[in-house]
Structures are given as C-alpha cells and as structure tokens.
Amino acid sequence: MNETCGAIVNTDALKKANDDAVAAYIKILENFYSFLISFALTQATMKLADGWIADGLSVSTLGRGVLYVSLLITIVPFYQGMNRFLYQTHVVRPIEKPSSRSSPMLLDLYAFLLMSCILFAMGRFLDNPKTFFYLWSALLVLDVVWSVLVWLIQGSRRPIWAGNNFAWLLAAWAYCEATSYWSPLPANLQGLDPLIPYGFVFFEFGRTLVDYWLNWRFYFPFEYRGS
C-alpha cells in the first residue's frame, strides 16, 4: 500500500489491473488475428472445392491442392509463433525482466495485421503459383524486417527464425532463376513446364521444418508439454 495525497493506493491491486489490461489487449489481438486466419483458410478451402467441382481431377486441381497444403504448412507456425510471441513478450518478459524494454504493441499489431492480410491473399491465389510465390516472399520479407526491428528494440536473443526465413527465401529465388521461372524451358524439358512453377513449395516446406527444429522450445515450452 502507498499513500498518495492522503489517499491509500493498493499497489498490488493497481498492478493486477494493469496486468489484466495488457492480457485483455493481447487477447483482442489474438482474436483479431485468428479471425483473419480463419477467413483465409475458409476462402482457400472454398476455392479448392470450387476448382475440384469445375475441373475434376486435373493438373490445375492438383496444383491448387499443392498450394493449399503449402498454405497450411505456412499458416500454422506463423499463427502459433504470433501467439507465443505476444505472451512471451508482453506477459512473461515484464515479469522476468522488469527493467527490460519490450517491442511496442502498435508495431506488433500492424506487423501481424499485414502478415494475416498476405496469408489471406495467398488463399485467394491458389490457381496462380507465380502470384502465390510472390506473396509468400513478401510474407517472409515482412517477418524478417519486423523480427530485426524487435531484436534491435528489445535487445533480446537473436531472431534465428529471421535468418532461417531469409536463407530459404534466397534459395527459392535462386531456384526460380535457375529454372528460368519467367521464360520457356529448353525443348528437352518442356514436359516439366506444368511442374516447374510449383517447385518453390519444397522450399516452403523446408523453411517450416527447419523453423520448428531451430525454435522447438519456443513453440513448445516445457509448461505446454505438461513437464
């Protein structure tokens, strides 16, 4: 208890109220992000189903299916990482390091909003692998820039996930250049034309697998595993 201007202030109650306000704000961000992600998945699922009905079992249908799976592989770690980051940064970090500096919530809000919009757009372009690839690239670039900004502000551990994203992004673009992504293939490889635009999906899968391998304890801390 503190006495201020003759009034007794319950500091414990005040701190709890502040903590509850932060938790409520984080919950709003999580719900908003969850809404946009679910909207993206709904749109992508409807587009996949409509394409199946219209084209039956065809190359274009299989292509949409591949991009749909790759979208899921991308959405899950981004959604999971967002929730873990908000909790770790704005709830746990202030308790463990009261004097430390956390990233501004407004920065996190706009970063996650833009990322969710990109994921939504990716679900819209399941029938266009080139545009899908551009959007995936934009998603990784945004995540790298935001991660570096957070690292500079907080002075926390190095964002190794950003390095992972950047490495796989470079590899994917190198693949596109090597396979003449924007020009016809040589005559002896013309039969691979329908498959070449989807080759970057392997890099998308690889990025997610390595991300989980590098950051397993962040995604699944001991308290989440009942330890």
Image (cartoon, rainbow, N blue to C red):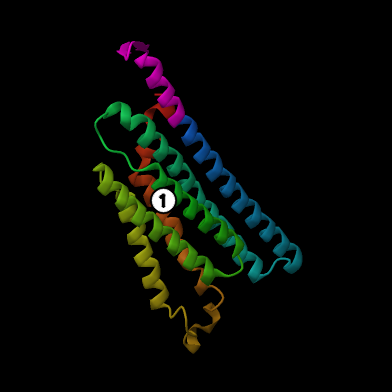
Quadrant in the picture for the C terminus: top left
Query: Does residue 226 appear in this view?
Result: no
The boundaries of the magenta stretch are 1-22
Name the kind of residue labelled 1 in the image. Answer: Leu
Estimate the x, y position of residue 87 in percent, counting from the top left. 41, 34
- Residue 66's image quarter? bottom right
Does residue 111 lie above or below 67 as drawn?
A: above
Quadrant in the picture for the N terminus: top left
**In the drawing, does residue 124 fall left or right of residue 188?**
right
- Residue 122's image quarter? bottom right
Residue 21 located within the stretch drawn in magenta: yes
Q: Nearer the viewer, residue 74 or 86?
A: 86
**In the drawing, does residue 90 fall left or right of residue 31?**
left
Query: Does residue 134 appear in this view?
Result: yes
Q: Nearer the viewer, residue 159 or 29?
A: 29
Q: Residue at x 68, y 69 (%)?
A: 58
Estimate the x, y position of residue 36 in percent, counting from the top left. 57, 49
Does residue 50 lie above or below 38 as drawn?
A: below
Q: Residue at x 46, y 78 (%)?
A: 181
Estimate the x, y position of residue 106 in percent, counting from the top left. 41, 45
Q: Which residue corresponds to mark 1? A: 209
Name the outermost residue toward the bottom. 187
Residue 214 located within the stretch drawn in magenta: no
Q: Residue at x 63, y 65 (%)?
A: 62
- Residue 222's image quarter? top left
